[in-house]
Amino acid sequence: MSDEQINKLKKNIIAIGRLLWEKDLASGLNGNISARIDDESILITAHGTCLGLLKESDILQLKLDGELLEEGRVSSEKLLHTEVYKNFAETKAVVHTHTTYTNAYFLENEILDSKIFETKMTLGQVEGVPQKTPAVTDAQPVMNALKHNNIVVLRNHGVVARGDEHFDCFLLIQALEDAVKVDAISRLYSSQSKNDAVSNLMKSSTSSEKKFKLFSQEQIDEIVRVVNADAQLKELGAKTNMTMDLAVHLDETGQTYSFCFEQGRIAKVGQDDTVEFFINAPEGVWRSVFNQELDPFVATTQKKMHLRGDFAKISQWYAPCSRVFELWAQVPVE
């Protein structure tokens, strides 16, 4: 990467730091930001810097093996940042900060599942990873959580987000902070506990103990059986007139299955890839979906899955589609 490109990355880091500060998503000398230079090195904010007042000299070059390439005191979270880049080759930006409301929420809760549609599709279920030290010393639990969502909470500490750009990370952090504010305010209007809802969400209700090979004909047949037997989906499909053609595609093998929905019921299964809505993803993402570790709408907005078709149009069937994906997860994969 040229010096000009590195200087541009530094300016992006400075701009995002200022934005985080102005939106009350960073305070004091807390938080750090990094950017990938190449496969071997990154830029990262130095220890003891204020994200709202960063200078180019506050941003240091660091090799992924931990070697500092210029004079300065590197961030205490260098392990967290370098491990993200090692584990996720597509990641180009990482932001870690200590957000007030998010930290407060996760002192008392282990996960957040927002009820607001826009937030639900952006964040999905956000996990809190136990944190026992002031800086991350065991990064593996964080890496495991980041496989399923681009934002993760470090309990008793803060949040970390990864993405293609720093602004992507900012949007996730801001959305999460807003989501926990909404949750806090909603509790003022209702004394009803959400603990039961969270417990139900975490339970895995499978219709069969048998596990199926991913994208096998046997798995598809079982999905059709489960979907067409569900009374809730039948009601939702009729109410929303869910009539469309949707295809799913496994990147590694090229396998495609198309589902013809009529009023929420699967009337026909084929292998047509020219349908109105086409979803493709690699094997790891599909496994996360079928194991209820990743919401398909979130996977699409976070670009883990790719949707061909009018997202606004398919959103009108959000409720029945969400039910379909719940039912898919009742057909466990090997």
Image: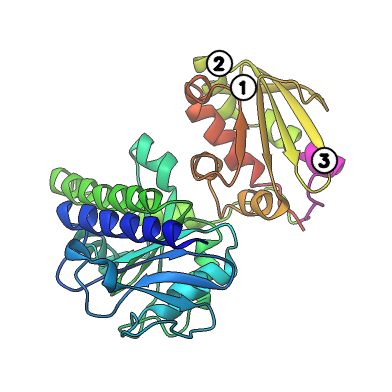
User: Mark 3: few, some, or many residues within 10 Å (few <14, many ≥20)?
Assistant: few
Q: Are marks 1 and 2 in contact (CB under 8 Å)?
A: yes
Q: Nearer the viewer, residue 202 or 98?
A: 98
Q: Sequence-wise, which precedes: disc 1 or disc 2?
A: 2
Q: Secondary structure at mark 1?
A: loop
158 versus 311 height, above or below: below
User: Mark 1: few, some, or many residues within 10 Å (few <14, many ≥20)?
Assistant: many
Q: Sequence-wise, which precedes: disc 3 or disc 1?
A: 3
Part of the protein shown in magenta: 210-222
Q: Residue at left 56%, top 20%? A: 237
Please state which amino acid type lies under the numbered disc 3: Gly
Residue 264 is labelled as 1
Task: Name the residue carrying label 3.
Answer: 254
Q: Position of residue 87 (x, y in %)?
A: 58, 69
Q: Position of residue 232 (x, y in %)?
A: 55, 29
Please state which amino acid type lies under the numbered disc 2: Ala
Please state which amino acid type lies under the numbered disc 1: Gly
Q: Residue at left 33%, top 79%? A: 75
Q: Secondary structure at mark 2?
A: helix
Q: Quadrant of residue 259?
A: top right
Q: Position of residue 6 (x, y in %)?
A: 42, 61
Q: Sequence-wise, which precedes: disc 3 or disc 2?
A: 2
Q: Quadrant of residue 47?
A: bottom left
User: Is 132 on the left-hand or right-hand side of 248?
Assistant: left
Query: Marks 3 and 2, how far apart in space?
Result: 32 Å
